[in-house]
Image (cartoon, rainbow, N blue to C red):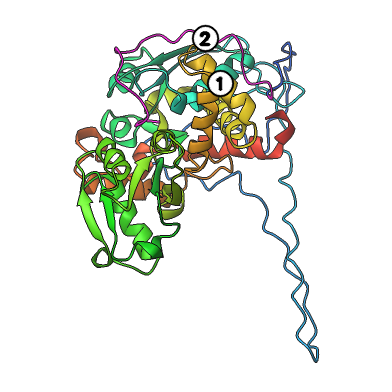
């Protein structure tokens, strides 16, 4: 999470935690497979610049149509649509992985014995908001990989990927593509903004009220447009105060100068103190579901030579996202480990509750659709943030086929993740 962090020295080495996600099965000893069958949707070499993105491989079959209902004298309720059948399991090659072919254990988890991964996170110091990417690195270790996980400020991890010191990093789209890197997976699918109010419970109730935003070009300004549009309102229906910073928005709403404001999810912890409870009346995932915080990225050359390793990173991220979405205790434990005790279990649990309302890490495979990627790119370009090497067409800076292969494995082998 790029905005839940404080600055830290460049590429501070994060020591591995003692425990990892318990829901992932430990990697079994590799089994030889000289003639192992290939999966029906194998991990393929990443597309070189100019190659169009492949269609999503992880999509579930369409739901069966509801049966026809004969006309009756009194209208009868329509039967509920049949549930979509589960995604068929793909055949997985057994044995240890290689750079170009991901191998699997009998339980469906990747066999990463002998694989070394140098992974970065462009997020400053270790805070609870980056627990998911940390948990992904720990999951890769549990699957047998030797993982070097490093943190960095600004674009330092992206530049480390360019220089070959790191294989891949999590980072904002702009710093990734501007460095000439390609996006191959999710990191934080939604920005973590919440529209909160101490008094009101809906956007419609804000008509004639005072609402704060940090800057006219900040994400919360665009999120406010979306929230008002969904409520059938415009900016003319409210009084807008530009506070200058998200921290100032928090302080002003606490002082009663604002009726509502957008804040980062972690600010909800500060607001809900001294017996006060702020209402969350909109979140960024609902207002602008396409608006992403960050992605996984690597050089085009590394992705072409190491598609299996990139797919393993995506699988580990999907498992970490599933942990956040369904296993609060495990995520909280990992957050405490990641911050080396700087955050205790009680505070990590409170942070989880706040982050949960922002829905930043969905585990349904969404976030890497072509239109979603393009919207994020176009928005960044409109703000003047796409520069130099970043100004490329989508097929030149994205490798969604790696993500799609990981999603199909993840969905067809749910018990393994």
Compute the Cα span from label 2 to label 1.
19 Å
Magenta part of the chain:
1-23
Quick check: 280 left or right of 315? left
Name the residue beneath numbered marker 1. 345
Residue 16 badge: 2
366 or 289: nearer the viewer: 289
Q: Earlier in the sequence, mark 2 or mark 1?
A: 2
Q: Position of residue 14 (x, y in %)?
A: 44, 10
Q: Position of residue 138 (x, y in %)?
A: 56, 17
43 or 76: nearer the viewer: 76
Classify mark 1: helix, strand or loop: helix
Quarter holding the N terminus is: top left
Whether 33 is among the magenta residues is no
Relative vertical location of residue 222 with respect to residue 393 in this rendering, above or below: below
Whether 3 is among the magenta residues is yes
Q: Position of residue 209 (x, y in %)?
A: 29, 60
């Amino acid at each position: 999470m790029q905005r839940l962090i404080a600055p830290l020295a460049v590429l501070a080495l994060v020591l591995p935690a003692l425990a990892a996600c318990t829901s992932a099965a430990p990697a079994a000893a590799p089994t030889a497979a000289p003639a192992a069958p290939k999966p029906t949707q194998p991990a393929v070499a990443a597309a070189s610049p100019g190659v169009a993105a492949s269609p999503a491989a992880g999509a579930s079959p369409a739901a069966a149509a509801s049966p026809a209902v004969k006309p009756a004298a009194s209208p009868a309720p329509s039967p509920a649509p049949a549930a979509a059948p589960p995604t068929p399991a793909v055949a997985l090659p057994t044995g240890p992985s290689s750079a170009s072919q991901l191998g699997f254990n009998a339980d469906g988890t990747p066999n990463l014995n002998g694989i070394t991964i140098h992974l970065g996170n462009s997020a400053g110091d270790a805070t609870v908001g980056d627990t998911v990417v940390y948990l992904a690195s720990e999951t890769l270790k549990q699957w047998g990989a030797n993982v070097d996980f490093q943190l960095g400020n600004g674009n330092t991890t992206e530049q480390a990927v360019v220089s070959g010191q790191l294989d891949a990093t999590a980072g904002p789209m702009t710093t990734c593509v501007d460095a000439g890197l390609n996006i191959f997976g999710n990191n934080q699918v939604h920005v973590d903004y919440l529209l909160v109010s101490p008094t009101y419970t809906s956007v419609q109730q804000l008509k004639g009220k005072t609402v704060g935003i940090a800057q006219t070009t900040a994400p919360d300004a665009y999120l406010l447009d979306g929230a008002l549009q969904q409520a059938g309102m415009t900016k003319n229906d409210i009084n807008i105060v530009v506070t200058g910073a998200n921290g100032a928005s928090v302080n002003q709403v606490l002082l009663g100068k604002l009726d509502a404001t957008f804040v980062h999810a972690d600010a909800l912890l500060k607001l809900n103190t001294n017996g006060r409870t702020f209402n969350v009346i909109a979140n960024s995932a609902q207002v602008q579901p396409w608006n992403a915080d960050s992605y996984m990225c690597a050089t085009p050359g590394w992705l072409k030579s190491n598609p299996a390793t990139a797919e393993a990173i995506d699988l580990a991220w999907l498992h970490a996202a599933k942990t956040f979405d369904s296993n609060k205790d495990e995520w909280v434990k990992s957050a405490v480990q990641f911050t080396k005790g700087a955050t205790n279990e009680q505070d990590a649990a409170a942070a989880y509750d706040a982050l949960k309302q922002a829905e930043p890490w969905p585990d349904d495979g969404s976030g890497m659709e072509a239109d979603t990627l393009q919207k994020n790119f176009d928005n960044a370009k409109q703000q003047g943030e796409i520069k130099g090497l970043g100004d490329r067409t989508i097929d030149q800076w994205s490798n969604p086929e790696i993500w799609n292969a990981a999603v199909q494995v993840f969905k067809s082998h749910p018990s393994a993740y």
